[in-house]
Image (tube, grey):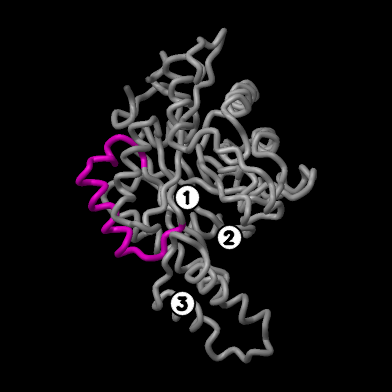
């Protein structure tokens, strides 16, 4: 449901998508410390380059500065955060309390996630919460915004938190044939936009989008495809072998390996420079290819502790300067 100004939240990301621009989001991982300067340095690489920045929530189940705290620092630096919130660490009371705080402090985008299992992180014996799953969290967020009701049914006593609501998708996770239906379920629960897991296998993603279009899910929410630069062959093989939901084709690995061809093994720095340059070129080409797929509304650039790479990628893809959208408007596909 839109507000009087024609927007659900009025966030910059919502305005960019509403105006029909190809959106670009980035990612900022909070530090494993209380160092706000760490966030400010990363923000300097992203400001003016992306429309909004995801601030992760104890990603990979490793303790870091909270997504709420780091998002506030991002706002202070002039960035628009997409605050991520996992169901792993909070029950419905804590989540709703943080929604109210986040909105009061200027945060307008929120991404609902289940969260990586705690056994993958640095506190493997911690107890998870999972009071709700990500789809239930989406519904709770939508009801807060559109019905002005907490999850228990009580009315919000005053201003309701009006978020542009996001969710995640893993198009290549097994069983892949269920992924479009899972996306449809998140759209029905209240997602306004989707950011996908990293995509390197374009033919597989095209097959996913064919089913998404058949179900007409792309008409109900905006789909931003996850892309990320490879730093070298080791990273490409790690993605292929150990990260669930990502497939890295052989030709991608062969190309990144070949970038350092002719450079002697002992010249490690030169080899790394060659690999990184090729990784950026490949990411630019990937964006240009994905942009041609019907139903793709933008890209989510995940540089993974390499924020300096985001500007040359976005610029190389012809996506700078980012659009400045002012005034009221509407995004017919996701309003109502």
What is the x, y in percent for residue 134?
47, 38
Numbered range of the magenta stretch? 198-222
Residue wearing tag 1:
300
Q: Earlier in the sequence, mark 2 or mark 3?
A: 3
CA separation in Å, label 1 and label 3 = 22 Å
Determine whether, in the image, residue 35 is placed left or right of residue 133: right
Return the mark for residue 309. Answer: 2
Image quadrant occupied by the C terminus: top left
Magenta stretch contains residue 194: no
The foreground one among 208 and 274 is 208
The foreground one among 59 and 325 is 59
Residue wearing tag 3:
253
Q: Which quadrant holds residue 98?
A: top right
Image quadrant occupied by the N terminus: top left
The foreground one among 194 and 181 is 181
Q: Earlier in the sequence, mark 1 or mark 3?
A: 3
Magenta stretch contains residue 219: yes
- In the displayed structure, would residue 241 be above or below residue 177? below
Determine whether, in the image, residue 60 is placed left or right of residue 244: right
- In the displayed structure, would residue 128 be above or below residue 318? above
Q: Residues within 10 Å of mark 3 (few under 14, many from 20)?
A: some
What is the x, y in percent for residue 296?
33, 48
Mark 1 element type? strand
Q: Residues within 10 Å of mark 1 (few under 14, many from 20)?
A: many
Main secondary structure found in the magenta portion: helix
């Amino acid at each position: 449901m839109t507000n009087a100004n024609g927007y659900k939240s009025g966030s910059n990301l919502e305005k960019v998508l509403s105006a029909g621009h190809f959106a670009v989001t980035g990612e900022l991982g909070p530090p494993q410390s209380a160092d706000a300067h760490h966030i400010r340095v990363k923000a300097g690489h992203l400001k003016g380059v992306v429309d909004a920045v995801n601030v992760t929530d104890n990603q990979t189940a490793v303790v870091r500065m909270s997504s709420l705290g780091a998002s506030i620092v991002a706002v202070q630096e002039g960035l628009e955060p997409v605050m991520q919130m996992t169901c792993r660490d909070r029950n419905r009371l804590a989540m709703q309390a943080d929604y109210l705080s986040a909105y009061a402090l200027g945060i307008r985008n929120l991404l609902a996630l289940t969260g990586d299992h705690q056994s993958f992180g640095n506190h493997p014996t911690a107890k998870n919460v999972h009071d709700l799953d990500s789809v239930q969290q989406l519904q709770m967020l939508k009801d807060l915004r559109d019905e002005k009701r907490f999850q228990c049914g009580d009315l919000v006593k005053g201003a309701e938190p009006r978020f542009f609501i996001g969710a995640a998708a893993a198009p290549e996770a097994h069983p892949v044939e269920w992924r479009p239906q899972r996306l449809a379920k998140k759209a029905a629960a209240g997602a306004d936009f989707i950011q996908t897991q990293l995509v390197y296998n374009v033919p597989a993603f095209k097959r996913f989008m064919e089913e998404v279009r058949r179900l007409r899910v792309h008409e109900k929410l905006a789909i931003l495809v996850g892309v990320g630069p490879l730093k070298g062959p080791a990273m490409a093989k790690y993605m292929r072998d150990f990260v669930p939901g990502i497939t890295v084709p052989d030709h991608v690995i062969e190309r990144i390996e070949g970038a350092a061809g002719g450079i002697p093994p002992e010249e490690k720095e030169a080899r790394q420079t060659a690999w990184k340059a090729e990784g950026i070129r490949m990411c630019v080409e990937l964006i240009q290819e994905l942009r041609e797929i019907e139903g793709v509304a933008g890209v989510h650039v995940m540089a993974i502790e390499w924020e300096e790479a985001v500007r040359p990628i976005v610029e190389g893809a012809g996506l700078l300067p980012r659009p400045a959208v002012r005034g009221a408007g509407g995004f017919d596909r996701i309003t109502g």
